[in-house]
Image (cartoon, rainbow, N blue to C red):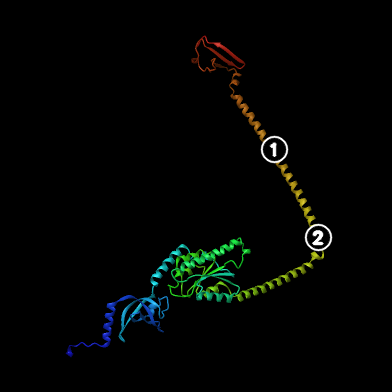
Amino acid sequence: MSSERKIYSVAEVNRKARMVLESGVGELWVEGELSRVTIHSSGHWYFTLKDKDAAVSCAMFRNDNTRVVFTPKDGLQVQMLARASLYEANGRYQLIASEMEEAGKGSLQEQFEKLKAKLKAEGLFDEARKKPLPLLPQKIGVVTSPTGAAIRDIINVLTRRFSNIEILLAPVTVQGPSAAKSIAAAITYLNKVEQASRLLHDGSESKRDACSTIDLLIVGRGGGSIEDLWAFNEEVVARAIFESDIPVISAVGHEIDFTIADFVADVRAPTPSAAAALAVREKGDLEGVLSLHERRLRQSLKTLAQDFRLRLNQAAHSYVFREPENLLQRHRQKIQALDAQMGNSLRFAARQAQQCVDELTMAMEHRMEQKVGADRQLLVRLDSQLRLLNPLAVLGRGYSLTRKPDGTVIRSTDAVEVGETIVTQLADGKVVSNITEKE
């Protein structure tokens, strides 16, 4: 019997058990509460995942847990992608996690990214439309819970930094189904208060009553889970912040928390206390800056006064004040010399112009005479040619011109008949004849 037995070591058994467990269960998503969380110096995480009925040991190694966006802590409800395994050294069954997120965050994160992309495409996050914060707001509106730590932190920081600041609280619900509408309504209300104040004072900046206008809004709450902060990821809140005429600082959660409100707001603060610090400078700092500018202004005025005094003394001892009559006489002589020079220049210019006119007149008359003579000679030549071409001039040399009574010139005997009447044009008159014979 002993020769037929297959004897396994404990290590071999555990190895087989691990292989069966890993191949049989595989990788799966599991949800539970973190407990006994240990972050090892190596960077690996070791913890227990439990629910009301069971618990299982888990590990998440450094290469995987660097992608997790939150710090694990006891009591946190999570969902994780893990594979079942067995630690061979002690035979302990465990889950090895490769991904982890807060429970419920998967669907909420998807909603967050979808709304973020939509509002970004519409331009709600554009830096160009963000309003600058006022240098020294005199009245600050705060949209938050009246009972939370956020309002206490904001009041403490504001009053410590600048005790003259007026704070107007618009109490809202910051968590739960009605929170988003409550926050959006408060932002809209404070803007209407500001608009009414401006209308009351005719919109004149010089007449603005510091106690009745709102210069800045702080919108936010303290930290919490993604579900706790979700009201600040709602579209109605984002659009209320975008449409606000008053600059808005968002102050939601802790430094690692980001909400849609942070992207839309004119300025994002990591915490409510940080928002209050961004809203106003330390009164002592401002007083120090003013004192520095006052000293520089006094020194500048002193230097300027010394410069003017020096220039006045130099002017008082200058020649113009010591010998004013001599200076006046010099300028009078200079003016007279310029006047004489100008008269000579004008007379010379007039003579030059007259000479030029005379020369142009003579040249024009000469050219006109040449033109008239040339035209007269041309006229004589044309008259002679015309006379030579005149047919009547030929008659004077003994020739005659014979026509029919209708004026037709007779060039051949064939053109007339016996008995016809003809008219002969001579140099000194006409002869009318009757044809009695043709040869």
Say what secondary structure mark 1 lies in: helix
- Residue 439 visible at all: no
- The residue located at (19%, 88%) in the rendering is 5
| Rendered image quadrant of residue 131 | bottom right
Counting other residues with Cα less than 10 Å from the Cα at mark 1, is it few (<14), some (14-19), or many (20 or more)?
Answer: few
Look at the picture and state if 107 lies above or below 427: below
- Residue at the extreme top: 436
| Rendered image quadrant of residue 73 | bottom left
Give the labeled residue for mark 2: 328
Q: What x and y, as percent, mark residue 39?
A: 41, 83
For the N terminus, the quadrant is bottom left
Give the labeled residue for mark 1: 366
- Residue 152 visible at all: yes
Counting other residues with Cα less than 10 Å from the Cα at mark 2, is it few (<14), some (14-19), or many (20 or more)?
Answer: few
Q: What x and y, as percent, mark residue 351?
A: 75, 46
Say what secondary structure mark 2 lies in: helix
